[in-house]
Image (cartoon, rainbow, N blue to C red):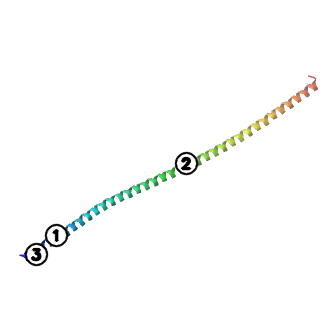
Amino acid sequence: MAAAALALAAGFALATVFFALAAAFATLAVAALARDVAGFFAAGFAAAFLAAGFLAAAGLEAAGFLAAAGLAAGFFAAAGLAAAGFFAAAGFAAAGFFAAAGFAAAGFLAAGFFAAGFFGAGVALLASASTGF
């Protein structure tokens, strides 16, 4: 009877060890599954942050590119305005030069007409004096 009780106690002890091992392995398996799932979600979040950072970088690059293109457009606009202003100034200078030259020539010719009038008056005076009229 004692041997049977001893065998039964040994069987319970062995069964307890097996159940404890099974519980430990089950706990490890659940923990590993939870770790894998958590790691999967963490990797998903990391990928989302990476994608967000990539899109942000692409947005900043595109914005910087468009801004640089806008600055280039401003450069061409400034160059165009400078060129237009330069040509306008050159045109006004040339027009003013030709106008001044024209007025000078007209004044010179007018002075010539005054001189002709002066000489004409002198001739008339001489003719008048010589003829007595």
Q: Residues within 10 Å of mark 3 (few under 14, many from 20)?
A: few
Label 1 secondary element? helix
Q: Amino acid at mark 3?
A: Leu
Residue 65: x and y in percent read 48, 53
Between discs 2 and 3, the one toward the N terminus: 3
Look at the numbered discs 2 and 3 and tell me whether their residues touch, using CB distance below 8 Å.
no
- Mark 2 vs mark 1: give the one in front: 1
Q: Give the residue number, with chain letter if any, for mark 2.
A: 74
Give the residue displayed 33% in from the left and 60% down from the top.
42
- Mark 1 vs mark 3: give the one in front: 3
Look at the numbered discs 1 and 3 and tell me whether their residues touch, using CB distance below 8 Å.
no
Q: Give the residue number, with chain letter if any, for mark 3.
A: 6
Q: Give the residue number, with chain letter if any, for mark 1.
A: 16
Task: Measure how far apart labels 2 and 1 are at the Cα level.
Answer: 84 Å
Quadrant (top left/top right/bottom left/bottom right) for the C terminus: top right
Residue 57: x and y in percent read 44, 56
Q: Nearer the viewer, residue 44 or 89?
A: 44
Between discs 1 and 3, the one toward the N terminus: 3
Q: Is residue 125 above or below residue 10?
A: above
Count all numbered tags in the image, as a single digit. Answer: 3
- Mark 2 vs mark 3: give the one in front: 3
Label 2 secondary element? helix
Q: Residues within 10 Å of mark 1 (few under 14, many from 20)?
A: few
Q: Name the side, left or right, on which 120 lies relative to 24.
A: right
Residue 8: x and y in percent read 10, 73
Q: Nearer the viewer, residue 71 or 57?
A: 57
Q: Amino acid at mark 2?
A: Gly
Residue 75: x and y in percent read 56, 50
Within the image, what quadrant is residue 22 found in? bottom left
Q: Name the side, left or right, on which 38 lies relative to 111.
A: left
Give the residue displayed 74% in from the left and 38% down from the top.
102
